[in-house]
Image (cartoon, grey):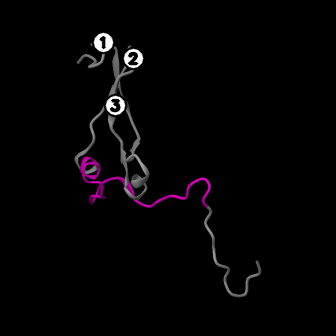
Amino acid sequence: MSCKGCQSNEQSVFNGEIAIHFSGHEALDRPMVFVFPKIVVCFRCGFAEFAIPDRELQVLEHGSPVKGAAVLTEKAAGPYETKTKSASPGMNG
């Protein structure tokens, strides 16, 4: 099979780990989708190609988690956000 970018036959297949997320501020409340595809990479032009499994594709299409899909749904604290704890009774500080 030749590269779709440059028609070269200088390609190889690699294992991948990719986190796909929605863009924009509204995306902070949407799931991050993880896929672990086989990626075909062209050594001549850098074009890469992979397929997204059905469950993860449904998450991307609808913007909500699907049972069995690899997603992260909790908002993580940003670099300038801090988590605060309430002191337990009897603790100083």
Q: Is mark 2 on a helix, strand or loop?
A: loop
Tell me the distance, in whole angstroms, between the alpha carbons under discs 1 and 2: 8 Å
Q: Name the residue under label 1.
A: 8
Give the residues drawn in magenta, as a range. 57-81
What residue lies at 38% left-to-right and 16% top-to-bottom? 45
**Left/right of residue 27 with respect to residue 8 in the rendered view:** right
**N-terminal label among 1 and 2:** 1
Q: Which mark is residue 69?
A: none
Disc 2 residue type (three-letter): Phe
Q: Which residue lies furthest to the front in this view?
A: 25
Viewport quadrant of the C terminus:
bottom right
Disc 3 residue type (three-letter): Ile
Query: Measured from the top left, where is residue 22 in percent x and y?
Result: 37, 47
Query: Measured from the top left, where is residue 21 in percent x and y?
Result: 39, 47
Tell me the distance, in whole angstroms, between the alpha carbons under discs 3 and 1: 16 Å
Q: Do the residues labelled 1 and 2 touch (CB within 8 Å)?
A: yes
Q: Which mark is residue 39?
A: 3
Q: Is mark 1 on a helix, strand or loop?
A: loop
* Res 7 → quadrant: top left
The magenta stretch spans residue 78: yes
Disc 1 residue type (three-letter): Ser
Q: Residue 43 carries which label?
A: 2
Q: What element carries label 3?
A: strand
Q: Which residue lies furthest to the right in this view?
A: 92
Callout 2: 10 Å neighbours few (<14), some, many (20+)? some
